[in-house]
Amino acid sequence: MKLPKIIARTLSVRLSLMVVCEIALLLMGSLAVMFYFSRQALKEEAMHNAEQTLEGTVQHIDNILLSVEQSAGNIYWDLMAHIDQPERMFTYSRQLVECNPYIIGCAIVFKPYFYTDRELFMAYVHRKGQSVTTDAQSELVTSETFTSRPYTEQIWYIAPMETGLASWTDPLKGEDTEDEALCTFCLPLYDRSQKPIGVLAVDLSIGLLSQIVNAAKPSANGYSTLLGRSGSFIIHPDPEKLSYQTVFTQTEHGAAPSVKEAGEAMVRGETGFRSFLMHGEKWYVLYKPFQPALVPGRSKEPLGWSIGVVYPEDDIFGDYNKLLYLVLAIAIVGLLLFYVLCRLIAHRQLMPLRQLTQSAQRIAGGHYDEIIPETQRADEIGQLQDHFQQMQQSLAAHVSELEQLTNTLHERSEVLQKAYRQAKEADRMKTAFLHNMTNQMTGPSDVINKSVEALCNDFGSLSEAAADREVGIIQQQSKTILDLLDGLIHTAEKEGGCL
């Protein structure tokens, strides 16, 4: 409550605040423009890096897939040459698993009763426990079954037998695998009439694929992700997502709806850049359809997969935000120091004004002889001090004259007051004198009045002696009145002579 009053009555504070506010507006405007374009440039650079990472990730994944496809293709013709030897199929399966460290299992299957003595035939060799490892010398297990369901009911067999095309399946999860999620390359086997008679299925562990791809992280906390046609995760750093979840089930595990929206865009085969919320943090994903390289002899059928590179916002703007906060903190501290400096300078420069204010207050209190110090300053404050000094000197001289005039008027006033008192006293004495004379003449006048009335009213009945007596009274009282009038005239002439 006191701060506005302090600002209102302190010029140095107002000047300092005005300067600091203008500097702050200019500084904040400059910082806002600089950081806006810096953020745009940083975002463009991040996008460029993400695109390069995305291309590198696609190439890395495609190299692994291509090596698996070529391994299967290399053994295909030798296998077809010995297709009438069922036991040899186990040898081919084992060779295929042994020759490529990315392959963790291989199954060679045929349609029912291809071998007349067997309804179903499967030559399946896989690494023990389907362990995620690239160790080519790991223990291999031979089996004639894959899960509890017959292979004729599983997608990796059904799809190539129906289409007659080599393809990759979406991750096989849950009951379709015995252990971990697999991605299978399915190569149909043809008879001489080019009809499918079986399938060469090569298993690639998506856990292994994720480890290989995510070993080269796109950023400190970023990762690459690859989605299948159904939204299943083929590549992701979280094993739980690889085994049981899809991008559409993320909302059930606490993810924001924006995660599902980004996943739907990827499954639709779109190319773009999106932001989404995950665990309360903002993330960005750059995505596009996964397109294998065109190699002679390779299937041109689209996989329907989509690949994305995911970055947390802190990886892109973390250092930028820290720099922003640091610069803002430095700016605020700098403005505070600048304010203190301006306040000190303004306080020092305005010190003569404060002295003039104090002198003006003393002069207003009646100290007209207040001494205004000399100044060597030639600026406006110095000029004001000089003019104020001249004004004080003129005011002091004028006040001195007024004091002399006042003293003279005071002396004259005392003389007039004395004369007034004398006149008033004389007037009082005259009034008292006239009152006294009037009282003295009242008695004789009454006596004369009664004698005259007696003479007038009883003139016929009065004796001559009585009439003479009344006339004598009238003469005596008239003489008394005349004596009083003579005394009054004498006194008036005397008073007039004194005046």
Image (cartoon, rainbow, N blue to C red):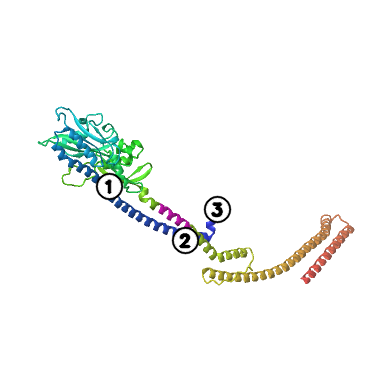
Amino acid marked by disc 2 = Val
Quick check: can you spot residue 153?
Answer: yes
The residue that label 3 is drawn on is 2
How packed mark 3 is, by other alpha carbons closer than 10 Å (few <14, some 14-19, many 20 or more), is few
Q: Distance between the residues labelled 1 and 3?
A: 65 Å
The residue that label 1 is drawn on is 57
Above or below, 118 relative to 497: above
Q: Where is residue 395 in the image (x, y as percent from the top left)?
A: 61, 69
Task: Of the two numbered discs 3 and 2 on the same chain, state the one appearing first in sequence.
Answer: 3
Amino acid marked by disc 3 = Lys
Q: Distance between the residues labelled 2 and 1?
A: 55 Å
Q: Nearer the viewer, residue 83 or 333?
A: 83
Please check the rendered image and state whether residue 105 is part of the magenta-colored stretch, yes or no. no
Q: Where is residue 65 in the image (x, y as percent from the top left)?
A: 23, 43
- The picture quadrant where one finds residue 402 is bottom right
Q: Which mark is residue 19?
A: 2
The magenta stretch is 322-335
**Helix, strand or loop at mark 1:** helix
Q: Position of residue 144 (x, y in %)?
A: 22, 31
- The picture quadrant where one finds residue 263 is top left
